[in-house]
Image (tube, helix red, strand yellow):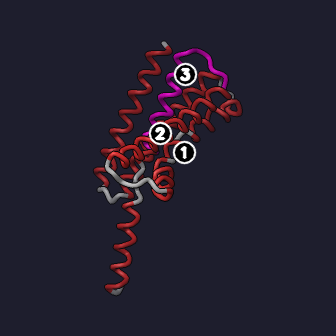
Amino acid sequence: MSSTDQATTRERRTLRRSHADYTGAVYGSMLAASVVIGASGLGEFPRLELVLLLLVTGLVFWVGHIHAHLFGARLAQRSLDRPTVLRVCREEWPIVEAAVPPAVAVAVSPLLGLGVQGAGWLAVAVAVTGQVGWSAVGARQAGASWRLVAGTAAVNLLLGLAIISFKIAITH
């Protein structure tokens, strides 16, 4: 491999690492699990309401994050042109995307023979799995060592288990 090819490969890795921020997906997965836990504490939710609650909450938090970033940029005296707004919208979109798998789990739960409570457990499991998975993928894409990847996955698993513990405490 020539030095030019090596430099190009290094540039690609650097670019990939700079776009490897999965924070929104991890956060969105944790948010989705929390929404399901909160809904479980309020009694029996029809599936459609829970699906809508997951998706709308993801959208509301997405808008909140966009507002926070753009407001912070204004405070720092940076201009808020259309490309900046669109970039922030794109960067925060994983918050919404992370709500989709748990919502789909709730939607397909009747096909699996699950009642509303089973659908809630499935949605929480999918959300926590997403949280752990996105944290590991993000760490690896950012060039973290396997030890650090395992560490971030373990921390996110513990956070997910904390959410599950709250669900058990609320429902029992």
Instruction: Estimate how packed mark 3 is, as few (under 14), some (14 to 19) or many (20 or more) residues with alpha carbons within 10 Å.
Output: some
- Residue at x 51% of width, y 31% of height: 124
Label annotation for residue 36? none
- Residue at x 37% of width, y 68% of height: 13
Secondary structure of residue under mark 1: helix
Instruction: Estimate how packed mark 1 is, as few (under 14), some (14 to 19) or many (20 or more) residues with alpha carbons within 10 Å.
Output: some
Residue 140, position as x, y percentages in the image: 37, 56
Label annotation for residue 28? 2
Q: Amino acid at mark 2?
A: Gly
First reached walking from the N terminus: tag 1 or tag 3: 3
**Magenta part of the chain:** 25-47
Q: Amino acid at mark 1?
A: Glu
The residue furthest top is 172
Q: Which residue is mark 3?
A: 39
Q: Is residue 155 left or right of residue 94?
A: left
Secondary structure of residue under mark 2: helix
- Residue at x 28% of width, y 51% of height: 147
Q: Which residue is mark 1?
A: 97
Q: Amino acid at mark 3?
A: Ala
Number of numbered discs present? Answer: 3
Q: Is residue 111 left or right of residue 39?
A: right
Q: Are marks 1 and 2 in contact (CB under 8 Å)?
A: yes
First reached walking from the N terminus: tag 1 or tag 2: 2
* Residue 159 lies in the magenta-colored region: no
Q: Nearer the viewer, residue 66 or 5?
A: 66
